[in-house]
Image (spheres, rainbow, N blue to C red):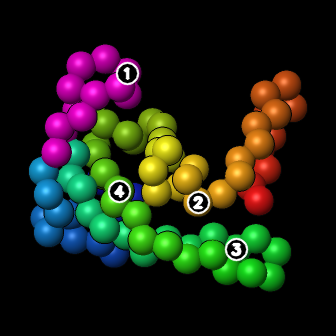
Amino acid sequence: MDVAEELGLDVSSGEKVVFGGYGSGKIDGMLLPVDMQLWLGNTPHRWKAEVIFSDAAKERQVLGQEGFFDQFEITFRRKSAEFEIS
């Protein structure tokens, strides 16, 4: 939940959730609405997303299909360890 605190979000105001698919087992988290913004060139793109914050994500941050990937065209280049957002 360190990321939520760094962003100034009050995780206690969120909804408790349990989810899976991230490693093994079930993971506790807090679901919060977040105002997102990403600059592509000189253009800001803003949207609202439901984000789950969890202490289990300290080693790895995960972007989801809903709330990020559905907003942009994402191209991954695994061999060169690069990605492009448009």
Residues tagged 3 and 2 counted as in contact (Cβ below 8 A): no
The type of residue carrying mark 2 is: Gln
Q: Which of the two labelled residues, at mark 4 and mark 2, occupies the earlier sequence position? A: 4
Mark 4: which secondary structure? strand
Q: Secondary structure at mark 2?
A: loop
Relative vertical location of residue 81 with respect to residue 6 in this rendering, above or below? above
Which residue matches tag 4? 51
Residue 6 visible in image: no
Residue for badge 2 = 71
Residue under the image location 28 percent in, 45 percent down:
54
Which label sits in the foreground, 3 or 2? 2
x and y, in percent, of residue 52 in the image:
31, 51
Q: Which residue position holds label 1?
A: 23
Mark 2, residues whose alpha carbon is within 10 Å: few (<14), some, or many (≥20)? some
- Residue that numbered label 3 is attached to: 39
CB-based contact (under 8 Å), mark 4 and mark 2: no
Segment colored magenta? 17-28
For marks 3 and 4, the one nearer the N-term is 3
Check the picture and name the quadrant holding the C terminus: bottom right
Q: Residue at x 76, y 37 (%)?
A: 76
Residue 4: in sight, yes or no?
yes
Kind of residue at disc 4: Val
Badge 3 amino acid? Trp
- Nearer the camera: disc 1 or disc 2: 2
- What amino acid type should be assigned to the residue bearing mark 1? Gly
Disc 1 packing (10 Å; few <14; some 14–19; many ≥20)? few
Instruction: Measure how far apart labels 1 and 4 are at the Cα level.
Output: 18 Å
